[in-house]
Amino acid sequence: MNKPKPLISAILNLNLHPKPLFSNPIHLMALTQTRTTHSDPPQNDAEDDVLCSNPEQTQEEQPSSPSLDETPSFVGSPGKYLTGVSRFERAWAHWTKLGRPKLIVAPMVDNSELPFRMLCRKYGAEAAYTPMLHSRIFNENPKYRSEEFTTCKEDRPLFVQFCANDPDILHEAARRVESHCDYVDINLGCPQRIARRGYYGAFLMDNLPLVKSLVEKLALNLNVPVSCKIRVFPKLEDTLKYAKMLEDAGCSLLAVHGRTRDEKDGKKFRADWNAIKAVKNELRIPVLANGNIRHMDDVQNCLEETGADGVLSAETLLENPALFAGFRTSNWVADNEKDSIDGKLDQADLVVQYLKLCEKYPVPWRMIRSHVHKMLGDWFRVQPQVREELNVQSRLTFEFLYGLVDQLRELGVQVPLHQKNDASATGNLAEVIGI
């Protein structure tokens, strides 16, 4: 019923026209930070945790954002995504209403924040996840809520992802965001040590009754559907039982990372697309594939081989947010130079666009620092002394970061992004995007 489209058709159907990016951001409490200028960042003992400045608005002009410190009341009947014989039809109707997005920004701690999501959307991403939010801290800490979750009207479709190990705490957090997203997602896939210590993410795979209770709590009580993101078990039959249990508990969409909990290194371990295909064939709800997505050829191959309804990308997007618009970094064209052309876009261009979005949608400086390192990694390898200049900056400013990009260009660094040589068949994607 949901066959993937041929590559050319898939590219033609990308939402490549630039969207209006500059509406007022929605915070989970009214913004109260004092306005700071480019040259005078906020003073704080932990500078990278401070929210970056919003130079275009005075304190009086800050957007009046709705405060969600109180949980919202229901609109309609709760539990509609769990009960009734039409549950699967509802799941598909919701996915169809969203346009059945295929190209999706994966959840990344401290990295899939609003400005980065908007940059990816400009370059073809059709949906996105927030970073993983800690449900207990989200409920208890107003500053965490206001800084770690922001959105705007163009930031849809949107998955808001929480980690949790208590159904009631998760439910309270989910109620705070359900009116600002299209899915509330449960992180069941984080394999890091912090997840082990906190007892969430992939480490709940050892306690399936608890996982079931988390899904059921949301499915019975929210007005938006619940989705889940998982990793696979070493044994396929265990993965299929797990996925079916989530579907039966009320999960309306499942994203499957085709690696096990112990396979943390994506460069060392290839994701198992066959396992994702088996899950897709087993379930009656939309299934997304995660793993091994480095460029658009991988997107097409993954859709064809797994039958998945969409793909997620994480690490590759951090280096190349224009991935879904057909651009690829030089390391993925080195063996096939004749089949690629200079895309007239580079990562320095993307950094500048990202910084402009950060000026409009303030985020903690640590997120900005991380993205600059990721996007300019190839450039820093050519001029490592520029990277060191960034590393020694305890307080970042936008002037410094724009100047850093200018310095790299003045030093003659050129690391273009590439497109396939047959891009003319669908038009020059850079021109279509309008850059």
Image (cartoon, rainbow, N blue to C red):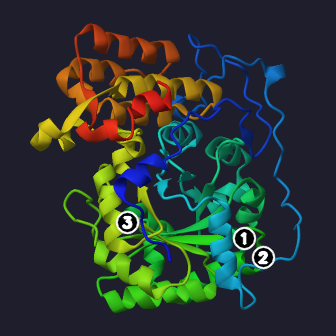
- Nearer-the-camera pick, 364 or 275: 275
Q: Amino acid at mark 2?
A: Asn
Q: Amino acid at mark 1?
A: His
Q: Residues within 10 Å of mark 3 (few under 14, many from 20)?
A: many
What's the residue at 43%, 58% (across, down)?
Answer: 312
Q: Quadrant of residue 321?
A: top left
Q: Quadrant of residue 61?
A: top right
84 lies above or below 311: below
- Nearer-the-camera pick, 144 or 236: 236
124 lies above or below 18: below
Give the numbered dot on residue 303. Answer: 3
Give the numbered dot on residue 62. Answer: none
Q: SS at mark 3?
A: helix
Query: Percent position (x, y) of residue 424?
Result: 32, 35
Mark 1 to mark 2 CA distance (whole Å): 8 Å
Tag 1 residue: 171
Tag 2 residue: 221
Q: Residues within 10 Å of mark 1 (few under 14, many from 20)?
A: many
Q: Considering only order in the chain, which callout, 2 or 1, is on the residue closer to the N terminus?
A: 1
Query: Percent position (x, y) of residue 21?
Result: 63, 32
Mark 3 to mark 1 CA distance (whole Å): 33 Å
Query: Percent position (x, y) of residue 405?
Result: 37, 16
Q: SS at mark 2?
A: helix
Q: State yes or no: discs 1 and 2 in contact (Cβ < 8 Å).
A: yes
